[in-house]
Every structure is written in C-alpha cells, then in structure tokens.
Image (cartoon, grey):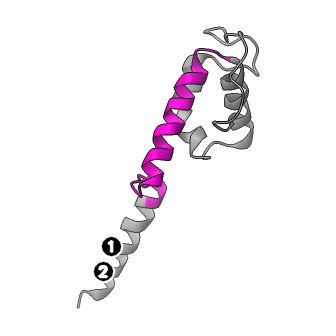
C-alpha cells in the first residue's frame, strides 16, 4: 500500500476476527511496525495488508504510522532495528575483546 492508493471501503473488520484468515483490529495494530518495516513472514504480512485495506478504522492509523516512519527515514533518523543493533553491539564487543592483551 502506498500513499497514492485509494482509501478502504466501508468494511470494518470484526473485533475478534471472522475466520482464521482474518485479523482483528487489535492483531493488526500489534503488527504495525513489523509490517511497515517488512519484518513479518509473507503470510502474516498479507493478512495485515488485507485487513488494513478493508478496515476503515485501521487504514488511517497505518497511514499515519507509515508517514511518521517515512518522515523519520527521510531525515536520516531511522531507528535501528533490534536485530541490527544487536549485531552491531556484538561486533563492537568482539572487537574490544580482540584488542585486550
């Protein structure tokens, strides 16, 4: 979904999710950052995408979060992902250990 895409229809996902393929608003919201960062497995990402495209309550929330992340990224303030940060810290610690006599 891009900022140029059409807003969702009038459908609102049921709070508890209807079928096993549907997500509730709460489930979609819990995955917002991983979804926007492309960190979800493909099947979960598709479920979140379908929910956001159809839910008039979640669509504005996800668009706001996307715009916020775009703003942060455009200004070079992109927060490090936890895995990236952990990897960087591990490399630094390893370098420090190798330097010790």
Crowd around label 1: few <14 · some 14–19 · many ≥20 (10 Å): few
Disc 2 to disc 1: CB gap under 8 Å: yes
Residue 15 in view, yes or no: yes
Crowd around label 2: few <14 · some 14–19 · many ≥20 (10 Å): few
Q: Quadrant of residue 75?
A: bottom left
Toward the front, the furthest residue is 4
**What is the span of residues highlighted in magenta in the rendered image?**
55-84
- Give me the residue at 70% from left, 20% from top: 8
Residue 64 percent across, percent down from the top left: 50, 30
Toward the left, the furthest residue is 101
Q: Secondary structure at mark 1?
A: helix
Q: Which mark is residue 97?
A: 2
Residue 67 percent across, percent down from the top left: 51, 38
Considering the whole magenta stretch, tell me its main secondary structure: helix
Q: Nearer the viewer, residue 80 or 74?
A: 74
In three-dimensional space, the C-alpha distance between marks 2 and 1, rounded to whole angstroms, equals 6 Å
Q: Is residue 44 above or below residue 8?
A: below
Q: Quadrant of residue 9?
A: top right
Q: Is residue 49 above or below residue 37?
A: above
| 60 horizontally vs 68: left or right | right
In magenta segment, residue 49: no
Q: Nearer the viewer, residue 87 or 34?
A: 34
Residue 65 percent across, percent down from the top left: 50, 34
- Give me the residue at 54% from left, 19% from top: 26
Q: Which mark is residue 38?
A: none
- Give me the residue at 55% from left, 41% from top: 34
Q: Which residue is mark 1?
A: 93
Q: Quadrant of residue 12?
A: top right
Residue 21 percent across, percent down from the top left: 76, 22
């Amino acid at each position: 979904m891009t900022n140029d895409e059409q807003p969702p229809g009038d459908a609102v996902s049921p709070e508890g999710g209807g079928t096993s393929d549907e997500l509730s608003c709460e489930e979609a919201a819990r995955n917002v950052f991983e979804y926007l960062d492309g960190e979800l497995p493909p099947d979960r990402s598709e479920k979140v995408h379908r929910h956001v495209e159809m839910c008039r309550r979640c669509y504005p929330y996800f668009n706001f979060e996307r715009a916020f992340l775009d703003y942060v990224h455009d200004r070079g303030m992109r927060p490090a992902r936890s895995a990236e940060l952990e990897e960087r810290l591990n490399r630094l610690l390893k370098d420090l250990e190798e330097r010790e006599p």
